[in-house]
Each structure stands twice: as structure tokens, then as C-alpha cells.
Image (tube, rainbow, N blue to C red):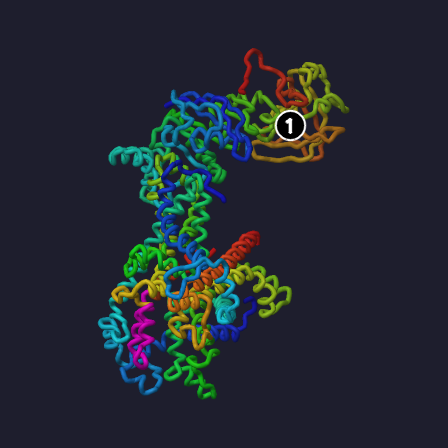
Amino acid sequence: MASIKLDALEKTYPGGVQAVKGIDLEVADGEFVVLVGPSGCGKSTLLRMVAGLETISSGELHIGERRVNDLEPARRDIAMVFQNYALYPHMTVFDNLAYGLKNRGFGRDEIRRRVEEAARMLEIEPFLPRKPRQLSGGQRQRVAMGRALVREPAAFLFDEPLSNLDAKLRVQMRVEIKRLQRRLKTTSLYVTHDQLEAMTLGDRLVVLNGGRIEQVGTPMEVYARPASLFVATFIGSPAMNLLPLEALLSGPGTAVHGALLHDLPSGTGIVGVRPDALRLEPPRAPHLTLAATLELFEAAGAESHLHVRLAGSDQTLVIRTAGQPPVAEGQRLHVHITRDALHPFHRESGRRLDEPPGAREQAA
Amino acid sequence: MVEHRPWSQLAAHLILIAGVALVLFPVYIAIVASTQAPGEFLRGTLPLVPGGHALENYRAMWESGLSRAGAPPVGKMLVNSLVMALAITLGKLVISLLSAFAIVYFRFPFRLFFFWLIFVTLMLPVEVRIIPTFQVVADLGMLNSFAGLSIPLIASATATFLFRQFFMTVPEELLEAARVDGAGPFRFFRDILLPLSITNIAALFVILFIYGWNQYLWPLLITTDSDYYTVVMGIQRMTTAADGDPQWHLVMAAVVMAALPPVLVILFMQRLFVKGLTETEK
Amino acid sequence: MQTKRMTFPGRWLPYALLAPQVIVTLIFFIWPSLQALYMSLLREDAFGLSSTFVGLANFARLFADDTYLDSLSVTAVFAIGTTLLSMAAALLLAATVNRMLRSRNAYTTLLVWPYAIAPAIAGVLWWFIFNPSIGIVPYALEMLGYRWNHRTSGADAMMLVIIAAAWKQIAYNFLFFLAGLQSIPQSLIEAAAIDGAGPVKRFWTIVFPLLSPTTFFLMVVNVVYAMFDTFGVIHATTQGGPSQATNTLVYKVYADGFVGMNLGSSAAQSVVLMAIVIALTVVQFRYIERRVNY
């Protein structure tokens, strides 16, 4: 077990492209940290730098107490689960699991013990004598994880392991991965582009964009107080509604309790409201009311998504409510918003403007 | 064909049967000739069906050859051909695998230079540089030897290119997983790359064996000792007999024996052969 | 040139891996080729004791020499004849086999095996068939009133070697044409049929143009084959005769160098051949690279 420490890590490719622009991060021993962001944000590159599959242009990387910048992947005491599983097609599952141990000089008995134990944990024992091509996607993914398990490394590195699975399998495997990690308590660094996966798996999330960290925090922190427009719209589904401040101030039938808006920090240009924070019934707390027309009704079983257009403008909002409210498309209705549902963002920089009382969350 | 016309199907079969017949024709004639009695050809007749002397003709050629024509026993020549073909095949396979591995999986100074150096050999078949190559082989004392027969022919790079193309298609993740698993270059090559290359190696084996077996000009030049004659070049000596007409029934027996091994290899490994051919040349 | 995303570190290992091929290439390929270049600039004296540097005189002499120019035209005729004959036959057979479904593999097997036959042996086989005294074909031709003798008639000799060389090459061309034909999407053929084109028209206006990369590739390969790999055919049958009628360039290199012992001229001829092959290979590679966008 070990911690992972990234200090000002940077990666510039020979062509001049800078994929990672200065990352500081500390993963505590036993913690499950998820790197999440859109394609091209540098999350995979960062993971591969930790693994040793990409060279580090500048900065320091420590695994445990050791500085590992120049160490071979095999020497860093890490194990990796690849997106495409990377199983050796010509070897049996048993040999696939055993390969890393064989290369490190483990004895036959010890190898067998570890392989069988990992196979039991992952429920792949019947597959041990088979070849990868005889297994389904989910089974192969388990074998890939088994390969990491048998090594009992200081850290697990996951590179979008669930991306190639169908939706249902993905949900299943997500739960299994979380259970396993809880049980083994191995330090884990997990990369995904799926924000739901990130939210459900991580002890902490690192939201990346364009090679930089936008925000680091627990899932709830990142959800409730996104540090920038990017994080606000990336995390949460359906995405957060964004309104220019003007849309809340002007227009007929708005701002019954307009005093709320004067409370917002100066420099606010854009206000965000989560779909689940928009109410169809007026709440007791002080609130803002907007008139709107229902354009589209999406019924998703336990919840519904209502797409409404604000009266007198082109602004649309998405409302997420439980069950199926008795409204029909084309109907006029009122939308209510309380102060704590408003996320103020700076007009130009997009950064969140109001600090939580006391603490500062900054990740360079 | 989109339309269904039964007579055109028949015509197609006829064309193909004609094609096959044309292709088989010379060999059929050769087999027929090889089974005739000694005097048959002197009579000026043309046998069209096999005679009954197959066994004695073949055995005669196998054991004693045509000494008057300077051709040693075919049995011996077949062995020489086999050794040469196998030496060329295995030699080429080994050095090509190693070179392709180096070019694809390592980065080092002058890499591009070596790549082009090897590439250049694709362009010049041995027939174009026979005299100086002969000189070098003679200077190295390699005339009349199996080394001389095979080593100069393993230089060309067709196999290296095939392996290079193939290695480029091996997924990146396999190498990465292997490195994380602690495999260095040697282990990776032995445990992962080689097993994955088996089909390509087998396909190339067919092509290279045929290439090696059918070598003509080179063995012709560098063997003066009949102990080292190979069977394909040896045939030629039989057909240019100094005294009178060649003994066709015996010559044809030798021809059939000389042509048989590569044909068998193709027939048994046809699928591999086709794959290897279409991938080497592109 | 593209490389793998990840490579092994290693100072001396890659060089060690390359060494066998590089060494063999240097000793048996580069060095002799350079020697050939150098020798082409020398002329030996009558006794073969010393050589003088004569610059490009050997080349000048070559191109002024009638027998060499004859050899050029002989080679051209031979190459074109072999290429046309074997490619046309192969295309016909491949197009026909492509229509078959069940018997495709059987026919393919039956047509492909001649690839294994050495050119020299192909030569001997056809030589036997065309033998003026006991060959089948002259027997049949005589009944039609034509006396075949490739020992005296240059044209007959040329026909013999062309047929022998083409016969063997049909298998190779057949395979590539078949692969090319199979890569043409069936939907194109069907669309053309709906557009009213009959089978023959479809072949010439749709299939054949789409086959052009394969055709071009095969043309270059066949010409190279005809110029070089056919040494065995000629040596085993006509030995360049009668009276130089089948004395192709590659045969002449051998005849002048090994038999006639005129090393300078032979080397110069080698160099000319080298230039031709390099030009052909470069053309082929350039074309193939552009074709990748097809």
C-alpha cells in the first residue's frame, strides 16, 4: 500500500503539443481517486505517466516514499487494467494471470495460490483453462482485473476499463469494482469520461480539462459546489441549466422576490441551476418565480424531464421532477428557484464566485 | 453475376476446365514420358498414356543418375536441394524476425538508415550482381559448400517487411501490459510476439521454401563439384547431353521428382501460402 | 516512418538484433553491388592480367553495340509477350472462378500449384512438348502444315520461352486478380445491373477500372519476373539462341561475364539492369502509396 504524489507534472509531446500542463495531486494510501473529463483532457496521459508508459517532461512523481520518474513500469509496483483488456490471446486465462508473477520469479505454488484466490474473488475460476477469445466482454474484463489483483501492488491504475461494455454490464461491473476496492483497500487511480461512473466510484474526483485540474473534491462537493462552468456542466445529468443573469432580471412575470438576485456577488454573468433544484410548486423559503411554457415532456419512469421555455425569451430550462406531474405540452406553468440553488459564475472567466464559508478549495 | 443464366454457368465451367487442362498438360506429358520404356522415344512416337516402367525409371534416376551427362544420382541431388532450401528458409526467417523486431520495437540512432539499407535489397535480385557476388563467395572460400549455396541468398528483405507490417498491427496495449508485467524485450519476443506470429511464419515458410528449392542460377555458378549439385540445376545438365538425344524417360522421371516437393508443400499448405503471398508483395 | 507508441529502451540490443541481417546484406549485397559499379568502369586487358579505368567507355560501347541493342529489343518482346499472355489468361480464369461459389476452392487449388514449379523446369517441360522430333505440339502443327523447330527459327524459340514463362506465372497473377476481384463490393455490381449494364459491359466499365491498382501492380511484378526470374527458362532451353534470338539482358550478363569472360561489359550490363529495376520499383512504390487513398 502506498500513496501517490504528483508535483507539478507536465507532459509535452515532441511536436509541441502540451497534454498535461502542471498537475499537483496527492492520493492518500487506500484512497480511490477518479480522474474524469472529456476526450483529450489529458486524463489518460496522466495515468500513463504514473504507470511509466509515458515519459514525464517535468515535475516529480512519488509512489510511496520513492521517486519513480525514471523507473520502468515493472519496477513501480503498480498494476494496470487496460481499456481493451490487453489479454495475451494465445495464453490461457491462468497463464495470463500468472505471467507477471512468473517474470518476477515467484514459485509455482505461490503463483497457483494467488491466481486461484484472485479467480475466486472475481468468480472466473471456471475460465482458468480457457483462452480469452472464448470469453465474453465482461469475463475478459474480470480477467484483466485479476491480472492486476494477483500482483498485490502498491496501487491499481484503471484506464477506462468499462468503456467497451454495454450499459447494463457497466453498471454491474461498477459495483463490483467498488466492492473489491473497499475490501482490498488498495490505492487506486481510475480514469473515465463518464461522470456517473466517476461520481459513484470515487472517494474523490479530479475533474480535468485541457491538461489542467478544474476541481478536486468528493463527489458531493463537486456536485453541490462546482468550481467552474466547465465542472458545472460536466458533472450531473441532465446538465445544469445556465442562464445569463439578465434573463432572471428582466422579462414579464419574473422576479417576484427580486431581492434574492441582489444578493449575488458582483461580476456574476451566468447563473446555474440544477434541473432537480427547479420546483413546480412554490417552496416556503424565499424564492424566485419565472413564467414558462412546457415544450417537451420526457417520461423516464421514476422521474420526468420537462423542457420549458421562459416566457418572452428563447431561454430553455430542463426540470427534473419525481414521478409524472400532471402537465401537458404547450401548457403554461411557473418555475420556482430558491437562493441556495443558484450557482453564480463570473461573466468572463467562468469561475465560481461565491466561496463557501471558511474553507477554500484550490487545486493548482 | 447478378443474372441467373444456366448456360453461362456451363460456359464458365468449360473455360475453367480448359484452363486447368492447359495448366496440367505439361506435367501430364512429363509423367507419361517418365513411365515409358527406354527405346520408346527413339522410335519417334508420341506416348499419350502412361507406360508401365515407372518404378524402374524412377529408381534408376534416384540411385545412379545420368553419369554420362554429368548428373549425379537424383536421390543425392534431392537431399542437397532439401538442405539448401531449408537453410535458406530458416536463415531468412531468423534474421528477418530479429531485424523486424529491432526496427519496430526500438528507437535508436540511425534507425532510418538501417531501415533503408535493408529496404534496398528488395530492389536487386541476385541475377543482377552475379559476378561480383560470385567473386566474394569465392574469396571467402565458400564455393562448393552449403554455406555458399544458402547464405548469400538470405539477404533480401521480403520477409523482414512482412514481419514489420505484422508487428505494426500488434495492439499497443499488449506491449504495455507485458511491460507492466515485468517482461523485458527478450521475454516479450519469446512469450508474446513469436506465438502471435506463428501464422505469418508458416505462410512465409511455404514461400521461402519454394524460393529456395527453385534456385537455379546461383547453384549453377558456384558448384563445380557434382556432390553439391542441386536437383533443379542438375536437370539442365541432363537435357544437354553431349552424345545424342537425351534419354527422355529418365530425364522426365528426374523432372517429376524435382518438381514434386514444392508442389506438395503448396498443396498441403495452400491457405497459408495464399495468405503469405498476398501479404508479402504488398 | 510510423513507430510504436511505446518502445523498449536499449543501447546496444537493437544493433545486435540487426547485426545478422546487416552483415549479410553488406557482405553479399552492398559490397558486390558496389563492385559491379566499379567493375563497369574498368576494362581488362586481353590476358585478364590487369585492368584500366576507362570511365563510361564500357557503357558507350554497350549502347553502340548492335548485339546489345538487339538484346534490349529481345528482352522487351519477351517481357511484353509473357506479361500480356499470362495476365490475360489469369484475368479470364480469375473472373470466371469469381463467379463460382461451391467449386471455387477446388478450381483455385488446381490453378495455383504451378507457382511451385521452377522456371527452369517449366522451360524443360515445354521444351519437351515442343521438341521438333518427339514433341506433341509440332506433331499437331505439322498436320496443319507448319514445321516447328525452335532450334532453327528465332520466332519459334521466342514463342517457346514466352509460353513456358507465362504458363508458370499464370498462377501468381490468378491469385492476385482473384483477391482484387473479391474486394470489389457486390453492391457496386448490383447497382450497375439495375442501371441496365449487362455482364460484359459491367466488366469493362466497372470491374476492370476498379481492378486497376492490382493490374498495375501485377504489370510491374510480371515485367520484373520476365526480366530476371526467367534466366532458368532460357538457360535450360534455348541458351539464348538460335543466333541471339532469345538472348535477354539477364542472360547476356551471364553469357558475357561467365562464358565470354568479358567482365567489364558484363558489369556495365549489370549496372544498366540495376537502374531499370530500381526505376520500376520506385514507380511501383510511388503508385502504391498514392493508391492507399483509394
Q: Which residues are magenta?
A: B233-261
Chain bearing tag 1 is A
Q: Where C75 falls versus A228 (above or below)?
A: below
Residue C181 location (% of width, % of height): 52, 62
Q: Main secondary structure of the magenta part?
A: helix
Residue B279 location (% of width, % of height): 44, 55
Judge from the rendering whether residue A354 lies leftward or rightward of residue A14; answer left or right.
right
- Let me know if residue B202 is in the magenta part: no
- At a point 54% along the width and 57% down the height, the residue shown is C283
What residue is disc 1 on?
Answer: A241
Q: Where A270 falls versus C171 (above or below)?
A: above
Question: Is residue C108 visible in this depiction of the protein?
Answer: no
Residue B107 location (% of width, % of height): 43, 39
In depth, the one of A311 and A207 nearer the eye is A207
- At a point 54% along the width and 24% down the height, the residue shown is A213
Q: Secondary structure at mark 1?
A: strand
Residue type at mark 1 is Asn
In depth, the one of A82 and A252 nearer the eye is A82
Classify mark 1: residues with Cα within 10 Å, few (<14), some (14-19) or many (20+). Answer: some
Name the quadrant containing residue A93.
top left
